[in-house]
Image (cartoon, helix red, strand yellow):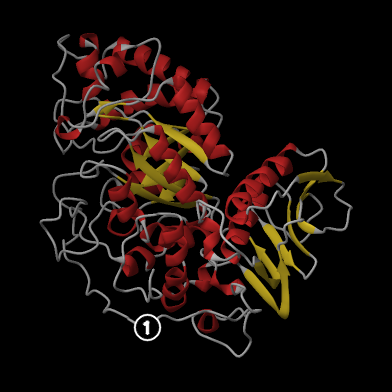
Amino acid sequence: MNVSGRLPGRPLSRRTKTSVIAVAMVVTVGVSTAAAWGSTSSTPAASGAVPLTRVVPRPASVQTKPGVAYTLSPGAAIQATAGSADAKDAADFLAGLLRKPTGYALPVRSVPSSTTPTGVALVLGGADSVKGAEGYQLDVTSKAVTIRANKREGLFNGIETLRQLLPAKLESPKPVGGPWRIQGGTIKDQPRYGFRGAMLDVARNFMPDTGVKRYIDDLARYKINYLHLHLVDDQGWRIQIDSWPNLTKIGGSTGVGGISKGYYTKAQYKDIVGYAWSRGVTVIPEIEGSDHQQAALASYAELNCDGKARELYTGFLKSDEGLLCVDKPITYTFMDQVIKEVAEMTPGPYIGIGGDETQNRSAAELKTYYNKVGPLVQKYGKKVYGWQESAVGLDPATTTTELWGVGIGDDEVIAAAKGGAKVVMAPSDHAYIDMKYNAEKPEYPVGNTWAGTTDVPDSYNWDPKTVLKGLPESAIAGVEAPLWTETVFGMDQLENLAFPRLLSIAEIGWSPESSHNWDSFKTRLAAQGPRLREARVNYYIAPEIPWPSGS
C-alpha cells in the first residue's frame, strides 16, 4: 500500500524527538492513578515477584495484596473447567508456555467450575464481574492463581497477563532455575477496542511459514488478536489456489528486487491459521484488488484488458500496470473462485479485498468492482474488510474499513461510518511500523520514510477518535499496526521495526483512554526489554526508553 511521496500535508520530519533517558525505573505499586503507574512506591511487590502494575498493555484495574505471593512448585497442576474445549485449549497453551523454562510436568486436569481453585486454574463461565468476551479476572493468593472469563478469548488474555507477572526468564527456550513467584492481588481487565490488529505484508517479500508463526507468538504476548495477512500484491502471489495454479507457479516465483519467492500451500496456510487460533489470534487473509495485481496479470493473460500477459514485477513501489480489468466478466469469475477457496480455508470472520491506492481509477470503475466483489465475500459467509478507498463502492452496513491516511476520500469514509461501517484506525504517520525510527542514518536500507519517521513516542501519542474529524466515535472498531516489507528481508529486520512500537499500538487498542500516559508507558515498556531479549526478539534499543542495564 506504499505510495511514492508522502501523505497530503504530512512533512517528512514532523516532530522534535524525545531526548535520551538513561536511568531505568521500576513500577512497584498497585494503585490506579497514572502518576503511580510510572513511579516507585512504598508498597513493594513480594520478594522476587513482578509488580502487577508492570503489564503492557496496561490493565483496566489492579489491586495489589502486599506481602502475598504464589510460588509455582514442581508438583503444581493446571486446572481447566470440565467439559469445556475452550478452557482445555487455554490450559494446554499455558502448560506449553510454563513447562519448557520451569522443567515442571504441570499436568492439565479437568475439574468442575464449582471446585475451589488450587495451583493454576482456568475457569470458564460464572465470572460475574468480567465484561465482554475478552474480559478476564486474575486472582493471585498464596494458594492459587485463578483466571476467570466468560469466553475463550478472555482466558487467553488472562494468560498473557499472567505470563508478564512471572520472571522474564519464563521466555527462555531452555529450562532455567526458579523461583517462579507471582505477586498477590487482583486484576480486572477488558479491552477498549475489540479489534487490535497487526498487518504483515508477505507479498512484496515472502515470509516462510516459520517466520509468520514466530510473529504470531510476538503478537500474542501483547493481546494483539488479529493478524491481517497481505497475501497478494504486484510483486508476488503467496497463497495456493487450485482453480488458478499459475498464480503461485508464476506469480509466486519472485518478489521485490527479484530476491524472495515462494508461497503457502493450502496445508501450510491452514497450519498458520490453526497456530494463530491456538494462541488467541485470528487470521484475516487479504486478496488485493482492484489494483496491486500484476502478479496475477503476469500469470494469466486473459485477466488483462488487452488479453496479453504482463511481465513479472520486481520494483519497490506500486506498479502502474497491476490493474485488473474491471469491465471483463472473467475478472469476477476469477475473484469468485479465489475468494471461495480462501474462505474455505479461513475460519475467521473476515476476508480482506484490499482497495488501496486506486487514485488512477474513476469513481465509476471503483463502484463497479466493489459492488461485485463485496457480495462475493458475503456469498461465502464472510465479512468484507477493505482499505479506506474501497468505501466508495461497498455496502457500509456489512463492511469494515481500514483508514491509513487522512485526506484520501475522507467524506466517503465518514459517510460509510454513518451508514454502519466499522473503521479500524491505522494512521500511517503513527501506526505504520515499517517507517524508520529516525532520519539519523538515511543510508540504512530497512524501513520507509514516505509518511515521515516514527519514534516510539510518536507511535504512542495519538488517539483513534481524533484522527479523522467528523468520524463517529461509535464507528471505531479498533487499531492496527501495518508492516510493509518492500525493504524488509527476514525476521531480524522485521522484528527490529515492529518492536517496541507494536507495544504502543497494543496499548492504545487495549487500555482505557483515561490511562494513556507516556511516562507510565515508557517505564513499563522498559521492563519488557529483558523479556523480549529472553524470547530472542530483535527489538530496537529506542533511546527514549529507560531500558534496564543489559537489556
Query: Which residue appears farthest toward the bottom when viewing the image?
Result: 42
Give left or right: position of 230 versus 135. Answer: left
The residue carrying mark 1 is: 23
What residue type is disc 1 on? Val
Residue 463 rendering spot, x and y as whole percentages = 41, 64
Residue 49 rendering spot, x and y as whole percentages = 62, 73
Mark 1: which secondary structure?
Answer: loop
Q: Nearer the viewer, residue 345 or 431?
A: 345
Q: Residues within 10 Å of mark 1 (few under 14, many from 20)?
A: few
Give left or right: position of 292 versus 398. Answer: left
Query: Which residue appears farthest toward the left when viewing the image?
Result: 443
Give left or right: position of 251 versus 402. Answer: left
Asked whether residue 209 is in view, the answer is yes
Q: Quadrant of residue 240?
A: top left
Q: Quadrant of residue 337?
A: top left
Q: Nearer the viewer, residue 359 or 323?
A: 323
Q: Is residue 316 above or below residue 551?
A: above
Residue 464 rendering spot, x and y as whole percentages = 42, 59
Residue at 39 percent of width and 25 percent of height: 264
Residue at 31 percent of width and 15 percent of height: 331
